[in-house]
């Protein structure tokens, strides 16, 4: 195989990589603050629909990006707020936002698609083409990786990063040290979920258009990617790249190596469980174990009167 | 403003709070549907009300009752099994295996029993994997059970596309129809409800009620939810208990999977993720709304199945029923998750 072919194969993975990596980076960053994030799939799906709708109505994909990020942030901050302010189950709150995200995505997407079809039929709407030039695809790799390095630095070198980790490990101790738990978790949701929203928009550059159910289960793949890398921004580059390639070449792999696409779809989830076991049972746990208070209720009991 | 723990739980909170959440959730959904797709609130509300008396909800009601009980067993022990979806589909696959690839269907009664039992074994074993990881490595069961749902989907997809692909499928990717003699028997006058599913639902509730209320195992599971340290101090094997609770939960979900195949679907179609009714996820709302009281499970299942049907019957301008259903379920679940705090806490205004 000539090297130019190898490069073109790699570049084809770019849209999937951008979508998965940004979303899983945001997922890992948010969960570091101790909120179990089961809303990701619903919000990811919602981000795709909102991004598509805003793009259609405004005629500008960048407006779509901003709208997708804003919608994701809204729901992410809602999750962070209710799970921190009230003694409620992170899982139940996350799953209800997931359901809501699926539902809203269907409603918004269907409305936007019929508008789009009408505009195109009346001939006043420009047809967009996806950015497929090599330069655009290289940027789809480079920009997310740069963002990932920035996040690694934020997590390890800044006060904010230290505060987020402290809140995720032990929110009560963090409070005693003067950290405002709810503020830190809201900031983590703001930053993390804006990446998840950006990932949704990245997904649109991969699948090109919205249809009913677009993106369902892909949020969970981002979830598995983040788990498999122990929520580490740099390691996530590897898992995101591997699983993006797997998703992109699912059918080619079947033709070439007789690997069933069903097995290919299963691999990220099996690897994620394997990684969770490894991060709990081996010395890797020092670096990659989940935050101690992940999913635990944080609530300061007031004295009963 | 602070939350203060009540001395006693809110009187009648177990009834008032779920009902209030359902009403508020439906109102929020009505507003959402009006704002985004312009669905008339009158139509939305009349869809909800007419679903409450629609005969179409009975099958969903029975399935959600069984699954609600399955989840209740785990939830009672504070084990958050959100993998009922995968466990039930493995049950469906187990039943399909017995019905399609063994000689048992020649003895229909034996075959039906084996279908349900094998489904329970497989569903239980699938859930027990998460139980083992939780018990021995302290890995949170929530992500594990959730992820295993998708592994289950793809395992079954693999089987249906590959070795189990039917001969008479008219171009669809699906298994053959299961033999007529192992299909569950329809109740006269109904097109969906079968005697066996009814029996299964009644048995599930009765046996689980007995198990939780009158056996040592049930007592231990309930204590596991409130005070696991007391169990350790009393010398109970907590690891085995966690695995058992998850296995029972998965086994009941598996039984429902067998009932879904023999009573309604009669074949498995590819891909699962687009053919599933998502009962495994919807049942989380049922178990949750029951406030973990098994007597309230049928009531919760009734209301949730009505909401489920209301979404499907909406049919607004190209919007699929699934979207409206998700909006209903999402808003009710979110409202309830927040409001149930107030059965044990009250808001107090304090000046700082």
Image: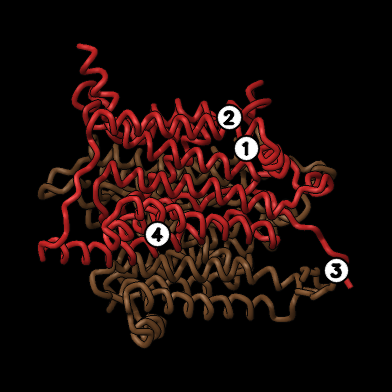
Chain colours: A red, B brown
Q: Is residue B233 left or right of residue B222?
A: right
Spatial separation of the CA atoms under disc 3 and disc 4: 41 Å
Contact (Cβ within 8 Å) of mark 1 with mark 2 = yes
Quarter of the rendering containing residue A238: top left
Badge 4 element = helix
Image location of residue B75, percent across then percent down: 62, 56
Contact (Cβ within 8 Å) of mark 1 with mark 3 = no
Image location of residue A138, percent across then percent down: 32, 28
Mark 2 and mark 4, same subunit?
A: yes
The chain that hosts pointer 1 is: B
The chain that hosts pointer 2 is: A
Mark 1 and mark 2, same subunit?
A: no
Q: Nearer the viewer, mark 1 or mark 3?
A: 3
Q: Residue under circle 1?
A: B139
In depth, the one of B151 and A45 nearer the eye is: A45
Spatial separation of the CA atoms under disc 1 and disc 3: 41 Å
The chain that hosts pointer 3 is: B
Q: Residue under circle 2?
A: A277
Q: Nearer the viewer, mark 2 or mark 3?
A: 3
Spatial separation of the CA atoms under disc 2 and disc 3: 46 Å
């Amino acid at each position: 195989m000539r090297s130019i072919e190898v490069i073109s194969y790699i570049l084809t993975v770019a849209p999937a990589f951008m979508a998965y990596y940004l979303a899983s980076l945001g997922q890992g960053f948010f969960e570091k603050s101790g909120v179990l994030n089961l809303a990701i799939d619903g919000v990811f799906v919602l981000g795709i629909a909102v991004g598509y709708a805003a793009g259609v109505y405004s005629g500008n994909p960048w407006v779509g990006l901003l709208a997708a990020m804003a919608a994701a942030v809204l729901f992410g901050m809602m999750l962070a707020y209710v799970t921190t302010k009230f003694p409620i189950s992170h899982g139940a709150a996350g799953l209800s936002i997931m359901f809501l995200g699926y539902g809203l995505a269907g409603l918004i997407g269907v409305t936007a698609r019929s508008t789009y079809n009408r505009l195109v039929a009346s001939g006043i709407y420009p047809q967009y083409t996806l950015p497929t030039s090599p330069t655009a695809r290289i940027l789809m790799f480079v920009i997310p990786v740069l963002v990932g390095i920035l996040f690694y630095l934020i997590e390890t070198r800044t006060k904010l990063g230290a505060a987020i980790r402290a809140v995720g490990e032990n929110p009560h101790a963090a409070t005693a040290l003067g950290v405002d738990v709810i503020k830190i978790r809201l900031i983590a949701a703001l930053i993390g979920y804006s990446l998840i929203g950006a990932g949704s928009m990245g997904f649109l550059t991969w699948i090109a258009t919205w249809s009913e159910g677009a993106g369902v289960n892909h949020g969970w793949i981002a979830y598995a990617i983040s788990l498999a890398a122990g929520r580490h921004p740099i390691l996530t580059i590897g898992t995101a790249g591997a699983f993006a390639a797997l998703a992109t070449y699912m059918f080619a792999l079947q033709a070439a190596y007789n690997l069933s696409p069903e097995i290919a779809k299963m691999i990220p989830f099996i690897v994620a469980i394997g990684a969770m076991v490894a991060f709990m049972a081996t010395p890797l746990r020092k670096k990659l174990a989940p935050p101690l208070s992940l999913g635990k209720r944080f609530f300061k009991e007031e004295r009963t009167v | 403003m602070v939350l203060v723990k009540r001395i006693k739980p809110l009187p009648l909170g177990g009834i008032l709070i779920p009902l209030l959440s359902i009403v508020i959730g439906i109102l929020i959904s009505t507003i959402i549907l009006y704002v985004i797709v312009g669905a008339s609130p009158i139509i939305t509300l009349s869809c909800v009300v007419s679903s409450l008396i629609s005969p179409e909800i009975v099958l969903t009601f029975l399935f959600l009752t069984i699954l609600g009980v399955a989840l209740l067993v785990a939830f009672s022990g504070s084990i958050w099994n959100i993998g009922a979806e995968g466990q039930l589909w493995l049950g469906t696959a187990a039943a399909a295996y017995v019905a399609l690839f063994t000689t048992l269907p020649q003895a229909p009664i034996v075959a039906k029993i084996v279908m349900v039992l094998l489904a329970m074994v497989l569903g239980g074993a699938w859930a027990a994997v998460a139980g083992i990881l939780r018990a021995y490595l302290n890995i949170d069961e929530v992500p594990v059970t959730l992820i295993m749902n998708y592994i289950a989907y793809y395992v079954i997809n693999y089987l249906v596309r590959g070795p189990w692909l039917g001969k008479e499928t008219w171009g669809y990717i699906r298994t053959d129809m299961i033999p007529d003699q192992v299909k569950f028997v329809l109740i006269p006058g109904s097109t969906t409800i079968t005697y066996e599913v009814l029996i299964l639902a009644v048995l599930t509730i009765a046996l689980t009620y007995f198990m939780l209320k009158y056996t040592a195992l049930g007592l231990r599971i309930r204590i596991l939810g409130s005070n696991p340290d007391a169990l350790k101090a009393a010398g109970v094997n907590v690891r085995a208990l966690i695995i058992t609770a998850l296995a029972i939960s998965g086994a009941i979900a598996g039984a429902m999977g067998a009932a879904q195949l023999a009573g309604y679907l009669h074949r498995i179609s590819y891909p699962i993720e687009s053919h599933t009714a998502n009962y495994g996820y919807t049942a989380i709302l049922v178990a949750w709304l029951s406030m973990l009281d098994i007597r309230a499970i049928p009531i919760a299942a009734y209301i949730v199945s009505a909401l489920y049907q209301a979404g499907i019957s909406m049919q607004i301008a190209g919007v699929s029923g699934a979207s409206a259903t998700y909006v209903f379920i999402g808003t009710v679940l979110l409202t309830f998750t927040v409001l149930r705090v107030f059965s044990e806490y009250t808001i107090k205004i304090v000046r700082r």
